[in-house]
Structure formats: structure tokens, C-alpha cells
Image (cartoon, rainbow, N blue to C red):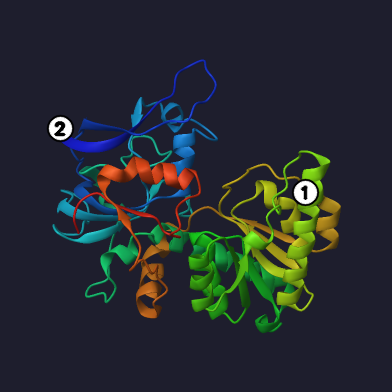
């Protein structure tokens, strides 16, 4: 058995309403690596939205879904190989690798269950040592000029790569050879949207994204993305409440749509990156141009969205839904990052110590994390 120090998510009580969970620090005994698995030590992890979902037990209690009393979460980050797999191709001892979180995948290479989240029997990165299937280890490029921690949020970049390319091809299916310079790609915010917008800008589109702090506004402007300061639209999110709240929402929505018209020369948003959903759905649909594409690979604020099918047909709107990326494309995406510098810039941000993981979880849940790619350290690089 392997003894390891870990932050553990325990199953919620049976027969009661779902209650938010807290991580507990425990020493666990894990099974020894199977022949196809390497023994690895997690290094730097990226806190992801599904980790927040796991702690909120929303939409499900993943421990009970997996049939396990305790789960170690964490599905994006870097590990170092301590002992290679015995009977499978494996990076050698000492190799620093990205985790490819494909717990279960379909015959076409797309993820069905996420390692370190809802894949049964998988161990995430919130532990000092874990067994890990060797095929999930993608080595960093040899002699890369980028510090290792810049590769830690790979999951968000790889997810953005897949979602953007599907959405872009869908838009091209209707718009032919139209010049992208006259079209706006807009994102509601977040690390995946930021990565996708950088790809959109490289493809020649106008780009814009919401931000809610001076630091984020400045970062977007520095990257050539037009910032839309959401503090200027304080009631934009719609919640079915009082008429007074509804009046404020209409006022913010009107001002926001005027801003979109200004950025798009009146066309509206040609490709809208919406990983929020829920309270922003109404204004999302109103901001979308004819022949526009709404694309999503996440559901941070709501999974169930109403759609007026007649309106969507008449406007020729295309709806794209993706999850993760194709396993076999992972090396090519990594190599594109290395070749072009399309990679997270985390040089000046705070990296949380392993002891401080619960604090990071609380801050993320409360919307108090200013970094697009919040990182935590498990073992020294």
C-alpha cells in the first residue's frame, strides 16, 4: 500500500438534502500501482470549476455517484514520475508531465468520465503521491523556455482549443469566406474563454470579454482583447424576483447591448463563448448576431436553459456543446502551445501552499479569486 498525505472529499449523509462539503486533511492508504500505472508525485495543480461543483455537491455528490466513501479530486496540473509503469510505455523517472484527465473515453477519444472527478477509482492531484495510468502522462516539451507552472492550467487551454475549433468551423459553415475582421467574438469571462479568445484574435476576429476588476481589465487590454467592465452593468444577470429588480436588469441589459453594438458595428456577437449560462442566458441570446454561434463547454451558473426554437431557426443560430477534447490530439495541442506561446501567463500570481487548499476552495466559491488560473502547490517543482 501507498501512504499519502491528501485533502479528501467525503460522501454526504444519506437521506438528507445536499449539503456543501469541506475538504479534510487525512493520511490515506492507496493501492500500489498496477502494471500499466506509474507512481507519481503531484506538483502544481490548477483549481477547476468541477472541483467547486464537487464541494458544492452540485449537480451530484460525486462520492455517491462513484460508490466511494472518500474521493481525492483534482484533474488539472503537473506531476513528476517517481516510478515508471512496469509493463506499458511510460515516461522515465523524474519526467515532469501534464495530467490528461481521461478517466473513461468513448471510441472516438472524447472524455466520458473525468479522472480526479467522476471517474470511479481515480486519484486526483490533492495528494502527495498517487498511482496514475501511464497513458495519461503527457511530458512537457524538452528544453521548453516556459517555466513549468505555466503548463499547469493545461486542461483549460486544451478544452478551449477543442471548443474554439468546433465553434469556428460551425460559423464558417454558414459564413463562407467572410472576413473575420468585421465580426466580434465575445466571452463572458474565465480562463477557458480567455484562452479561446486568444485563438479568435489570432484568427483575425474582433474580440471582447467581460472583467470585473481593474487588474483583469488591464490584462485583457494588454492582450489585445477589448475589456467590457461588468461593473458598468451591475444588474445584468437576470433572477426571477421583484419588478424593481427586473427594471434594473432591463436598464443594465440595454446599456450592455449598446456596448456590443458599438464593438460589432451593429451586427451583434458572431461567436459567443458562454460557460456561465443561468442568469446570463437571456442577454446572451439577445446579443447574438444572425448566423451567430453560441458555444459552451461549461455550465458554471446553470445547466438548464430555455430556448425558443422558432426564433433560433429563423435567426440561423447554431448551438455548440463540447466537453474536453480528443485524447489523441493532446500532443499536437501541447506542441502548438510550445511553438506559438499560446500558454497561461502566471508569472506574477500567488500560488497557494498545500496547507492553504481549503482557503483557495472558499475564495473560489465566493468569487474572490482574481487570477484566471488559480494554482496550488502539492510538492516542490
Classify 178 as above or below 356: below
Q: Earlier in the sequence, mark 2 or mark 1?
A: 2
Please report the residue visible at 45 percent of the width from the left and 53 percent of the height from the top. Answer: 369
Asked whether, in this view, residue 324 is left or right of residue 46, the answer is right
Disc 1 element = loop
Classify 220 as above or below 211: below
Please report the residue visible at 33 percent of the width from the left and 39 percent of the height from the top. Answer: 122
Q: Residue 46: give x, y in percent of width and height.
A: 37, 54
For disc 2, the marked residue is 1
What is the quadrant of the C terminus in the image?
Answer: bottom left
For disc 1, the marked residue is 307
- Which mark is drawn over residue 196? none
Q: Are marks 2 and 1 in contact (CB under 8 Å)?
A: no
Asked whether, in this view, residue 319 is left or right of residue 122, the answer is right
Q: CA gap, disc 2 to disc 1?
A: 52 Å
Q: Residue 311: give x, y in percent of width and height.
A: 85, 56
Asked whether 271 or 6 is in front, the reply is: 6
Q: Quadrant of residue 149?
A: bottom left
Q: Is residue 268 at all visible to an observer of this figure?
A: no
Badge 2 local density, few (<14 within 10 Å), some, or many (20+)?
few
Asked whether 269 or 216 is in front, the reply is: 216
Asked whether, in this view, residue 212 is left or right of residue 257, the answer is left
Please report the residue visible at 15 percent of the width from the left and 32 percent of the height from the top. Answer: 1
Disc 2 element = loop
Q: Quadrant of residue 304?
A: top right
Amino acid at each position: 500500500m501507498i501512504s499519502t498525505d491528501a485533502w479528501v472529499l467525503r460522501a454526504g449523509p444519506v437521506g438528507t438534502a445536499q449539503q456543501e462539503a469541506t475538504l479534510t486533511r487525512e493520511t490515506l492508504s492507496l493501492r500500489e500501482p498496477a502494471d500499466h500505472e506509474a507512481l507519481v508525485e503531484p506538483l502544481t495543480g490548477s483549481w477547476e470549476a468541477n472541483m467547486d461543483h464537487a464541494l458544492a455537491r452540485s449537480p451530484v455528490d460525486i462520492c455517491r455517484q462513484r460508490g466511494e466513501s472518500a474521493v481525492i479530486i483534482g484533474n488539472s496540473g503537473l506531476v513528476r514520475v517517481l516510478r515508471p509503469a512496469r509493463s506499458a510505455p511510460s515516461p522515465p523517472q523524474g519526467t515532469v508531465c501534464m495530467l490528461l484527465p481521461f478517466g473513461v473515453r468513448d471510441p472516438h477519444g472524447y472524455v466520458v468520465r473525468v479522472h480526479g472527478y467522476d471517474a470511479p477509482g481515480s486519484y486526483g492531484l490533492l495528494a502527495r503521491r498517487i498511482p496514475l495510468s501511464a497513458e495519461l502522462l503527457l511530458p512537457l516539451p524538452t528544453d521548453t523556455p516556459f517555466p513549468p507552472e505555466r503548463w499547469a492550467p493545461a486542461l483549460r487551454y486544451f478544452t478551449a482549443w477543442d471548443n474554439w475549433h468546433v465553434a469556428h468551423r460551425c460559423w464558417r459553415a454558414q459564413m463562407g469566406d467572410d472576413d473575420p475582421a468585421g465580426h466580434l467574438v465575445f466571452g463572458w469571462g474565465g480562463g477557458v474563454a480567455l484562452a479561446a479568445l486568444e485563438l479568435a484574435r489570432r484568427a483575425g476576429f474582433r474580440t471582447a470579454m467581460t472583467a470585473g476588476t481593474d487588474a483583469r481589465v488591464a490584462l485583457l487590454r494588454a492582450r489585445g482583447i477589448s475589456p467590457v467592465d461588468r461593473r458598468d452593468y451591475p444588474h445584468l444577470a437576470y433572477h426571477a424576483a421583484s419588478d424593481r429588480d427586473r427594471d434594473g436588469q432591463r436598464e443594465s441589459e440595454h446599456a450592455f447591448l449598446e456596448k456590443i453594438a458599438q464593438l460589432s458595428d451593429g451586427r451583434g456577437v458572431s461567436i459567443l463563448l458562454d460557460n456561465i449560462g443561468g442568469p446570463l442566458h437571456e442577454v446572451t441570446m439577445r446579443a447574438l448576431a444572425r448566423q451567430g454561434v453560441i458555444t459552451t463547454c461549461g455550465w458554471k451558473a446553470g445547466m438548464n436553459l430555455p430556448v425558443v426554437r422558432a426564433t433560433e431557426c429563423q435567426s440561423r443560430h447554431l448551438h455548440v456543446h463540447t466537453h474536453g477534447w480528443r485524447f489523441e490530439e493532446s500532443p499536437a495541442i501541447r506542441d502548438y502551445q510550445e511553438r506559438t506561446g499560446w500558454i497561461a501567463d502566471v508569472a506574477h500570481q500567488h500560488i497557494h501552499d498545500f496547507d492553504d487548499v481549503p482557503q483557495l476552495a472558499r475564495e473560489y466559491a465566493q468569487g474572490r479569486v482574481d487570477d484566471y488560473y488559480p494554482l496550488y502547490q502539492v510538492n516542490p517543482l
